[in-house]
Image (cartoon, rainbow, N blue to C red):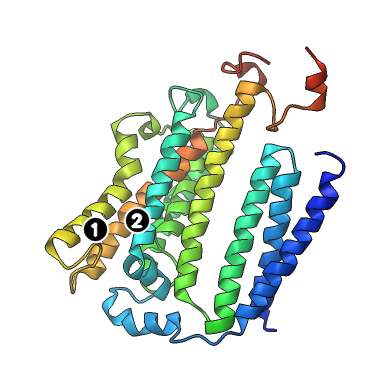
Amino acid sequence: MTPHLLYAFTGLLLFVTGLFGMIALDHLLRKLLALNLMGSGTFLVLVGLAQHRNGVDPVVQALVLTGIVVAIAATALGLVLIRRYYHLSGRSSLEPDTNDEAGP
Amino acid sequence: MRRWATPSLLAVCFALVCVLGLGLWSIAFDPVGKSLPERVRDAMGSSGVDHPVTAVLLNFRSYDTLLEIGVLVIAAIAGISMARLPSLEDPAFRTHDALLGALQRWFVPLMWLVAGYLVWAGAKQPGGAFQAGAVLAATGVLMRLGGMPMDFLQPGRLLRVGLVLGFAVFLLVAFVTALVGDAFLAYPEGMAKSLILLIEVSLTLSIAMVLLSLFVAAPVTDATGNQEGGHR
């Protein structure tokens, strides 16, 4: 068990934690953070596994760098969409609260 | 969420951890053939740069980078079209703080210098277009928060050109190399260094522009400025 393999398994745990958060949390910002956690976990798995097998691997590092930039853009776009959704509907989660359903 | 859902979701996630962990463990010790780092090392001589990550990003796997800047441009266009204000650069959002203004006079040129250095350093050490673009975008955020006028963020020709510059230059190089040379994005012998530099500089400008316009597209709104949410 090398440190690099430990990174890969940590990434796996982060990924599943993020997946759980994506499904279980209601607030859209939390969902977005959970999605980012999933992405970071994937990057850790990629880099950790490749370094464990081959040493420092520039191909995987470049792929992860590409992934990070795309993740930033996706997060920013998600934030803009969430803001717009909040302004249009006044809600911060996708499903209406139970309090709302009791109303007219 | 309903009450029974969380425990069962936890159980599913735990099972997923076990399955994926077993999968990781089983492939972690598989023997591999000729490894990718060796292949990269063998091909470094023809790449035009000295740093392996930059060589992979802009030469060996430049197709990925081309698609990546395409994704960024699409994200920026989508973000801008969601913006609340007709003008992306509204004077009402500027703050006027003497200390911030004085600091900016020192920081902004320095940060431009750092961004330029990062582009150039990408050839032989960690650095490159994306890091430099991030620094440049941070400079833009600082300038915007400090109330410096940034007219190029008005929707118009400059904004459009700035957003698509990196993608356009990259695509142009790709098509020219495909028509004149051997293949899509296969740089001709001896020209790799200058072509990579050209692409890197235009990528830096475009990435900074994309990140900055995504930041500006979500302006801080006060409670009374809720003009678009009709039914609250």
Front residue of A44/B87: it is A44
Query: Which residue is painted at 73% across and 57% down in the image?
Result: A17
The answer to the question of whether label 1 and label 2 lie on touching residues, with beta carbons closer than 8 A, is yes
Tell me the quarter of the picture where residue B55 sits: bottom left
Q: Categorize mark 2 by other alpha carbons within 10 Å: few (<14), some (14-19), many (20+).
A: many
Q: Position of residue B162 (x, y in %)?
A: 33, 42
Quadrant including the N terminus of chain A: bottom right
| Chain under callout 1 | B
- Residue B174 in the image: x percent, y percent? 24, 58
* Residue highlighted by disc 1: B174
In the picture as drawn, the residue positioned furthest to the left comes out as B180
Q: Position of residue A73 (x, y in %)?
A: 50, 47
Q: Secondary structure at mark 1?
A: helix
**Sequence-wise first label, 1 or 2:** 2
Pick the residue in front: A2 or B113: A2
Q: Chain of mark 2?
A: B
Please report the residue visible at 36 percent of the width from the left and 47 percent of the height from the top. B206
Instruction: Give, as a three-letter code, the residue at label 1.
Output: Ala
In the visual, does B82 lie left or right of B165?
A: right
Q: Which residue is mark 2?
A: B66
The one nearer the camera, B141 or A1, is A1
The answer to whether residue B17 is left or right of residue A66 is right
Q: On screen, A85 above or below B184?
A: above
Examine the rendering and report whether any part of residue B143 can be seen. Answer: no
